[in-house]
Image (cartoon, rainbow, N blue to C red):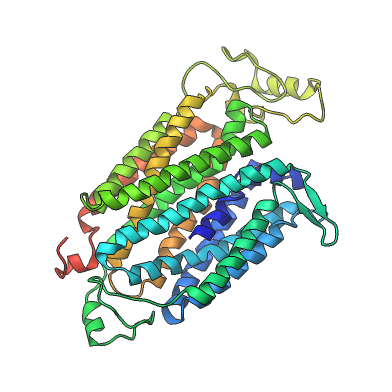
Amino acid sequence: MFLSSVGFSIVIMSIWPYLQKIDQTADASFLGWVVASFSLGQMVASPIFGLWSNYRPRKEPLTASIFISVAANCLYAYVHMPAAHNKYYMLIARGLVGFGAGNVAVVRSYIAGATSLQERTSAMANTSTCQALGFILGPVFQTCFALIGEKGVTWDTIKLQINMYTAPVLLGAFLGILNIILILFILREHRVDDLGRQCKSVNFEEENADGSQISEGSIDQVAVVATNILFFVVLFIFALFETILTPLTMDMYAWTQQQAVLYDGIILAALGVEAVVLFMGVKLLSKKISERAILLGGLIIVGVGFFILLPWGNQFPKVQWEDLHNSSIPNTTFGEIITELWNSPREDHNEQPIGCPSEQAWCLYTPVIHLAQFLTAAVLIGIGYPVCNVMSYTLYSKILGPKPQGMYMGWLTASGSGARILGPVFISHVYTYLGPRWAFSLICGIVALTIMLLGLVYKRLIAFSVRYGRIQE
């Protein structure tokens, strides 16, 4: 889990400037596809690795998946080499890294099978803590590597450029090799039932008589589908926030690419620290309040966070190439503005343009999102997301019961990956063409519908053993 989250977050802040550097034809819409390719690979791989883990020792899918991630990170370090179509090589590299990250399904199914109901929430919270630490250290590593600069150093023998964009993925490759060694020499199979009684240490359905009795009963498929939808929305929302963070701050606060990588990396690292604290708190809170209630509270907090992000006021963002008056909108047509900006002389052709791109029409009439407003929303989203995340798959593992969960966990991970595919594509297009007001309003509507869905299935989100009266809730 740690490696998967590091692999995603260690480059998330630098993908956009690196993409612009290696291929001038790449635009914000293609950025959405590059970010989403990670999740597309994970969505395809998760059911495959999950099914594999149901019938074979888990070391096999884990080792194979991590090896793919290592190779993909090495490819990412060389995407600047081809003479053309560099953006597509980056797309392939990120997709393969995501394919390797499909092992999350194997990890979750292992934890579900190795813990009793009483231990489950705490174990899932600990796993999420490792994942959150990955999201913390990923941006931190990226921030530290930003000190190397865009030029960096070149290893001529193997034509490897080590700079602020490639150093993070090379570190990711090293961590992957280390993880393979740990899996081969330390990991062992372990399985218990919902009461914590030891089962055969095999991860497929070949149990003794007691095991067949324990597994007796059908899974509530309505609860399974509903939980998949809830998990999809939770990851969809956070994927939106991660993807739009860099373009939003560059547009609203006229940050340069290097400033955006540095400051946004610090923000995501701070949210990661916040998440770790929350995971520890959830372990204690879940002993007094049901997981369903905690999930509901997390969704409400996320909704409030995005509501706060809605633009308001009379101050407008700085537009690239020319400073427009923030107190009013010029009484000229959009075509005239574009023509004037295009024909206006630049003071320095080598200076990187900053501010809200004039090609985005909404920059001329959408109020700026104040920094305090943005930070407040980020804190609230940082509270709601980790709570909803851990509660979603904790409830899911309890609903499934004692049967091998590899395939089901694969579908859950695939639903989350689907969210990470659609989220970046959705937000990059809506944000580019309609602006933050429309984008964040639509997200608020999605959260409201999700809360309604949770209310409809609230009573069905109970553990398998509780449903059949074997354990009291």
Where residue 275 sits: x, y (%)?
42, 46
Picture quadrant of residue 237:
top left
Count of numbered circles in the view: 0
Report the residue at 56% width, 21% height from top.
365
Where residue 257 sits: x, y (%)?
67, 36
Q: Is residue 221 visible?
A: no
Residue 337, above or below 240 = above
Report the residue at 22% width, 75% height from top.
217
Residue nearer the viewer, 303 or 175 = 175
Q: Is residue 296 left or right of residue 28?
A: left
Where residue 38 sits: x, y (%)?
57, 57
Picture quadrant of residue 221:
bottom left
Report the residue at 59% width, 66% height from top.
178
Picture quadrant of residue 304:
top left
Q: Quadrant of the C terminus?
A: bottom left
Where residue 306 sits: x, y (%)?
42, 35
Report the residue at 47% width, 77% height from top.
52
Q: Is residue 441 left or right of residue 74?
A: left
Q: Is residue 283 visible?
A: yes
Residue 362, above or below 301 = above
